[in-house]
Amino acid sequence: MVKVFAPGVIKLFGEHAVVYGKPAIAATINRGIYVECERGDKLVVETVGVSTSLRYFPEERRTEAFGSERFFAYVDATLRIAEERWGALRARFVIRSDLPPSAGAATSAAVSVGLLKAYSHCAGVEMGRDELARLGHRVELEVQGIASPMDTAAVSLGGLLKIWTNPFRVEKIETSLPPFYIAVLPRRGTTGEIVAEVKALLGRRRSAMGVIEAIGALVEEAHVCLVKGDLECLGELMYVNNWLLGALGVVDGRVVNLLEMVKPFIYGGKISGAGRGGVVVLLPRDEGLVERVLSALGHVYYRVSLTQSGVSVL
Ligand code: MEV
């Protein structure tokens, strides 16, 4: 049996602008997706902890799963690409998640890259991280339509990374950061839809391109603060990045309210990923008080540490 862990990713600075050629800064975390593969007589994919809803028909004693179509779109595209690359495989895959799906923690990239890694190992092939990142990005492009290689590169390579898309380049940032909190709000829209709406806005309003330029400049400043380990500066730039994302229409009132409530206890916070809810990443000043506020508000939240490794066989 092959067991693989593919980390989730928090986007610290630069999402959305990364789609338009600006660099972004993202980091792998100690939660993510586990994929097991065991060869057998048919191809089957089981999921555990990947949220889906059930519909039960008592007269027929039949249960139907729904709400999982988007998740399985990534699985389907990944299996098709894997089969093209390494030939057909009869195996049982089990996918477990300890992060909520489609929230902005790169779980779709982790599913694609983790499944590709497990498939290749099960097929007896060892593949390089760059190729994994490239194939994972192909899956995201097929399913979402528009996608930068940021999430799939981060899941494949691991660490705190500065990522440029065009031409594609990755630089590891060496620094040490304390744990973050991620609060998860229900998401309104898929990554593909939100990225397409931002694209439409930029097409309609030329001045909105100034926001993308400002995010690009902010990422450079944040890079300097990260290297210095300057948490005050990082927190402040997280807030600025969040307001700039708000100008692109992807930060809603729920995120603003949440940040207002925890403000005295954090250096800063922002959405992570496409936005419209989803993951809100918080850099805590006082972990205990952040937890108290998040629990009192009834939010789903996790304390996460940044990690150094990308997808790996366990
Ligand atoms: C999604 O995790 C991040 C976005 O920048 C889209 C992308 O980079 O593909 C919003």
Image (cartoon, grey):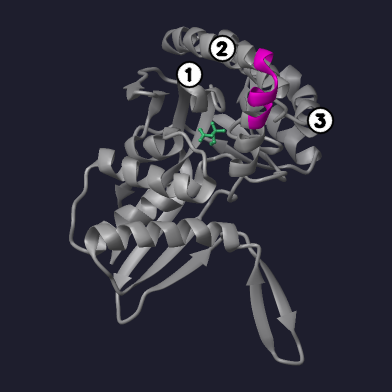
Q: Does 81 appear above or below 265?
A: below
Mark 1 near mark 3, Cβ–Cβ under 8 Å? Answer: no
Q: Nearer the viewer, residue 96 or 157?
A: 157
Q: Which mark is residue 152?
A: none
Q: What residue would you read off at disc 2? A: 213
| Distance of label 2 from label 3 (alpha carbons) | 24 Å
Please identify the quadrant where the N terminus is shown: bottom left
Give the magenta-colored segment's residue range: 200-207
Q: Report the side of 66 relative to 114 (left or right).
A: right
Q: Report the side of 123 relative to 37 (left or right).
A: left
Q: Nearer the viewer, residue 63 or 29?
A: 63
Q: What residue would you read off at disc 1? A: 22
**Three-letter amino acid code at disc 1?**
Lys
* Mark 2 or 3, nearer chain start: 2
Characterize the local packing of mark 1: few (<14), some (14-19) or many (20 or more) Cα atoms within 10 angstroms: many
* Mark 2 or 1, nearer chain start: 1
Q: Farthest bottom residue? A: 59
Mark 2 near mark 1, Cβ–Cβ under 8 Å? Answer: yes
Q: What residue would you read off at disc 3? A: 253
**Three-letter amino acid code at disc 2?**
Glu
Q: Where is residue 301 in the image (x, y as percent from the top left)?
A: 65, 41
**Three-letter amino acid code at disc 3?**
Gly
| Distance of label 1 from label 3 (alpha carbons) | 26 Å
Q: Position of residue 11 (x, y in %)?
A: 53, 29
Query: Label 3's element?
Result: helix
| Distance of label 2 from label 1 (alpha carbons) | 8 Å
Q: Which residue is drawn at 64% across and 42% down?
A: 193
Toward which corner of the image does residue 223 lie, by quadrant?
Answer: top left
Q: Residue at x 38, y 24 (%)?
A: 166
Q: Where is residue 255 in the image (x, y as percent from the top left)?
A: 75, 31
Q: Which residue is drawn at 50% across and 51% down?
A: 143
* Residue 92 magenta: no
